[in-house]
Amino acid sequence: MKNILTGIFIAFVVLGSPAFAAGSTEAVDVEKTPWLKGVEISPYPVDLSPVLPLKIYLENGEPVPATVTEDIPLTVVAETSIFDPEPIAEYKGQPIPNPRWEDNPAVSWFVIDWEKNKNFMATVQEPLAINQMVVVPTTPTGKGAITCHIARRMRYDLSEPGTSKATFANSSGAKDVRVLDITPPLCGLEISVKGGGNGAFWPVENPPNKYPLPKQADVYLSGAIFNAAEKDILVSGIELGKNMIIAPEQGVITLSAKDEISIKVIGGDNYKLDNSKLRFGICDGAGGEPAPIVPENTDVIKLSKIRLPKAPYIYLDATDTTGNRQLMFVPLKIK
């Protein structure tokens, strides 16, 4: 009860203070709020903090396109009076006496992924004008935005001679964009041998966010089936795409003709994998379209029940919803 009374008292004092009594145009319903009888509320805020409009466009003056492409840089420009030599002298009809800047603008650019509720800050090392930024959208998204937020410290005089007050002017804007996916999926396979050793292989984009195309990847081969139980085998510099072939001298899956293996897909896509186009299994040879020798997507394969070709490979075929495709072949040796 004491806290409630204290809050009412503070509200009355603040609303009744001279700062709020400068010619209100709002009518007060004294029947509903009798404590406001005779109180005039100023239409202006006590603490000025101007919010200035901001426009975002490309460096050539063209508007930011609704669709941009992953990993392709674009230079954007922010246009706002917060960069002017002097601050505005009036804000929403309220005069700002003797306004002056006290610092340079603090500018932040972000690429926002609304689907995942994440934001990625844009920064560059090269010198640019303070109102410019090179933005690289590294994460594909169906719904996103390029945003800019700016704050600049300013000061203005108060009515009492010799006194002043510091505040911040703020400016922000956004352009909605869709970021197009150009990176093939990064899927691998985990292979388990019934009563024996296991293993896996998977690609990692390296360098990340590479442009121009083609993308590059490192492929890791791990586990006893690769004779890599102690240390992974790394195959570097493979083009990420539809013709990812591991040569026998780089790494080979070694199994027994009596083995029963289980296959599971690992990894995924940097945006959205099209599960309806996911394929894996054993095929004849490598390169081009796979020639399966067992029904595709067979989870459990008994090697003794199939007739293996001279050059068997385990393959993985993955496509994302944009149409980017990853097709990888890893050689299979039966001892």
Image (tube, rainbow, N blue to C red):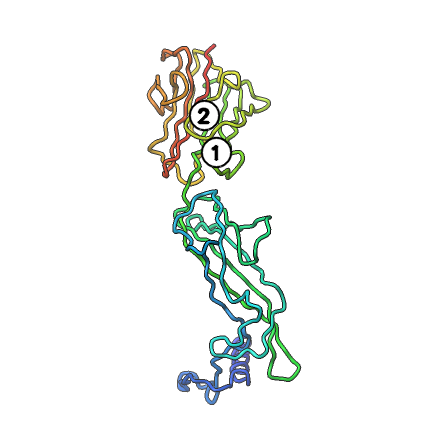
Q: Which secondary structure lies at badge 1?
A: loop
Residue 39 in the figure: left or right of residue 276: right
Disc 2 residue type (three-letter): Met
In 3D space, how far apart are the residues under numbered discs 2 and 1 (Cα atoms)?
12 Å
Q: Which mark is residue 215?
A: 1
In the image as oriented, which residue stretches furthest toward the bottom? Answer: 38
Residue plotted at (50% across, 53% down): 110
Near mark 1 (Cα within 10 A), the count class, few <14, some 14-19 or many ≥20, is: many
User: Is residue 277 shown left or right of residue 330?
Assistant: left
Q: Position of residue 95 (x, y in %)?
A: 52, 79
* Labels 2 and 1: the sequence-earlier one: 1
- Graded by Cα atoms within 10 Å as few (under 14), some (14 to 19) or many (20 or more), the crowding at tag 2 reads many
Measured as percent of width and height from the top left, residue 330 is found at 46, 21
Looking at this rendering, what residue extends furthest in the right direction?
Answer: 162
* Of 318 and 157, the residue lying toward us: 157
The numbered dot on residue 240 is none
Mark nearest the camera among 2 and 1 is: 1
Residue 256 vertical position relative to residue 207 in the rendered view, above or below = above
Task: Work out whether 319 lies above or below 135.
Answer: above
Q: Report the number of discs.
A: 2
Q: Position of residue 252 (x, y in %)?
A: 50, 17
Which residue carries the number 2 mark?
244
Give SS at disc 2: strand
The amino acid type, in three-letter code, at marker 1 is Lys
* In this view, 230 is above or below 55: above
Q: Residue at x 45, y 49 (%)?
A: 113
